[in-house]
Image: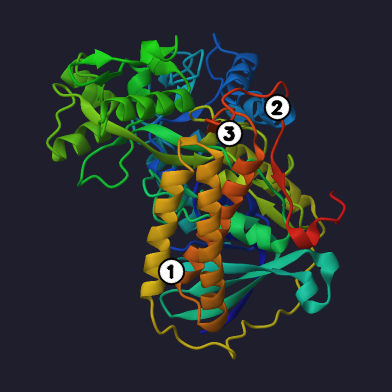
Amino acid sequence: MPNQYQYDALILGSGAAGQSLALLLASHLRVALVTKRGLADSASSLAQGGIAAVLDTADSVEAHIRDTFTAGAGLCDPDATRFVVEHGREAIAWLIARGVPFTRGDDPELGFHLTREGGHSHRRIIHAADATGAAVQTVLSENVLAHPNIDIYEQHIAIDLILGERVGRPELGCVGAYALDIKNNRVVTFAARSTVLATGGVGKVYLFTTNPDVATGDGVAMAWRAGCRVRNMEFIQFHPTCLYHPQAKSFLISEAVRGEGGLLKLPGSIRFMPAHDERAELAPRDVVARAIDFEMKKHGLDCVHLDISHKPADWLRGHFPNIHARCLELGIDIAHQPIPVVPAAHYSCGGIVTDLAARTDVSHLYAIGESASTGLHGANRLASNSLLECLVFGEAAARDILSSPQVPPPALPPWDESQVTDADEEVVLAHNWAELRQAMWDYVGIVRTNKRLQRARNRIRLLAREIDEFYSNFRVSNDLIELRNLVATAELIVNCALRRHESRGLHYSRDYPAPLPRARDTVLTPPRFRHRSSR
């Protein structure tokens, strides 16, 4: 069994971004697709609502851009936003050509049903019932598995990127990565001309999240250690409506439920959203999440309720079959009962700084999907723009990689375990993991203060020292790698939040409740690269 592999392109992550890029490259290059669980384990597969794109003649690119800007609270990059929106129809056509079974509609010209979600001025969400992500992921996986030029490495978690300076060739930038083969408990080396971070989000840094267990900020942490800038990490989107039930692990109640008429209520069937925003239930997610948080604290509630029982049962089963079935399994008939919901960490709008070709600050290193900060989302992501971003920037990365000189990577040194031993007490990792997630939930949540943020930073720094010592002395494990990345990511979130002296979008501070006149990005630069000229 080899310990070293060489490829034209190495993709870390198997969500919609990673798999779509693999397919776009594989006609010309040999591709390694590395995923730390199974091929289908990603946040993409959990996406319910759909993909936002201008497909209806009554809609327009300018309207979609305007809605994105409004949700982004002044921080969306104009060029990135236009780039994504203008390529929306093309991205959807690519998925349809590969067989994604989007829900059909009555419009003979369009052919597909479009729904509307919070923050959108038009119906522009193309979807596959209420399990769009799963439908997209299934089709992409079928295509990936069938392609002879794509090698899939499941149960492999990346440890760190390998830079050319490690072999005396700093001009090469990123030349691959070390990864732990979890199943065989060995570290392997991947050498590649191009390396792509498609590792997803950071949700597991919080106690409550809609994200899968794999969302541990790996790409952001690895890129930071490799010398990449990160941007706007303080903007963590809390989805307003995660199912509140002791037996339901991170089950999301789609934005589309509110888009189709679902109403948020307090006990006694009292609506509260109109008192918080004139858009009521169709306000952007940050507004709705803060309103729910406010009402829960004001009334001492464990949850609020989302009621769509005024719709016919057959209609609900047709539009939301998975939500209807899952709730019914838990004893909740949404045709007759409201759904108990709470906010939960859902999406990171910040990430690794990239350009319109998905390039990072390190040459031959790309970032796509939730791990990247393209400039599209600004201070708050507009619903259903995320899968669109994955596809558009996956195609942009493919175009840049294919047009780059094909220089083979150098021979890379193997992973060195000569100075470490097996860990003696794994309980340290479990304790630190629990402490980190609780601290982030308590101090870096929906509503923040400087005092809370400083408390979080103090605790994170203590944990970071413990974990660094552990990492230096013991062989790596899956839990250690993830915890190391989570702590690094948590510190980046807190440091960005402490730098923002205003409330904007997803970052709400009681110390600075008003926005500043001018919107500015929060950009962090790794210390040892601080004086390096940017590209």
| Residue sitting at x 44%, y 36% | 238
Q: Position of residue 265 (x, y in %)?
A: 26, 19
In the image, what residue type sits under mark 3? Answer: Ala
Under circle 2, the secondary element is: loop
| Residue sitting at x 51%, y 51% | 456
Q: Quadrant of residue 227?
A: bottom right
Which badge, 3 or 1, comes first in the chain's sequence? 3
Q: Position of residue 445 (x, y in %)?
A: 46, 40
| Residue sitting at x 17%, y 17% | 268
Closer to the eye: label 3 or 2: 2
Q: Position of residue 320 (x, y in %)?
A: 28, 28
- Write down the residue under mark 3: 91
- Write down the residue under mark 1: 479
In the image, what residue type sits under mark 1? Answer: Asp
- Write down the residue under mark 2: 519
Residue 137 visible, this angle: no
In the image, 93 versus 462, the foreground residue is 462
- How packed mark 2 is, by other alpha carbons closer than 10 Å (few <14, some 14-19, many 20 or more), is some
Q: Quadrant of residue 57?
A: top right
Do residues under tags 2 and 1 come within 8 Å of each other at their CB atoms?
no
Q: How many marks?
A: 3
CA gap between label 2 and label 1 equals 38 Å
Q: Is residue 85 left or right of residue 200?
A: right
- How packed mark 3 is, by other alpha carbons closer than 10 Å (few <14, some 14-19, many 20 or more), is many
| Residue sitting at x 60%, y 58% | 221
Which badge, 3 or 2, comes first in the chain's sequence? 3
Residue 329 visible, this angle: yes
Under circle 1, the secondary element is: helix
In the image, what residue type sits under mark 2? Answer: Ala
Which badge, 2 or 1, comes first in the chain's sequence? 1
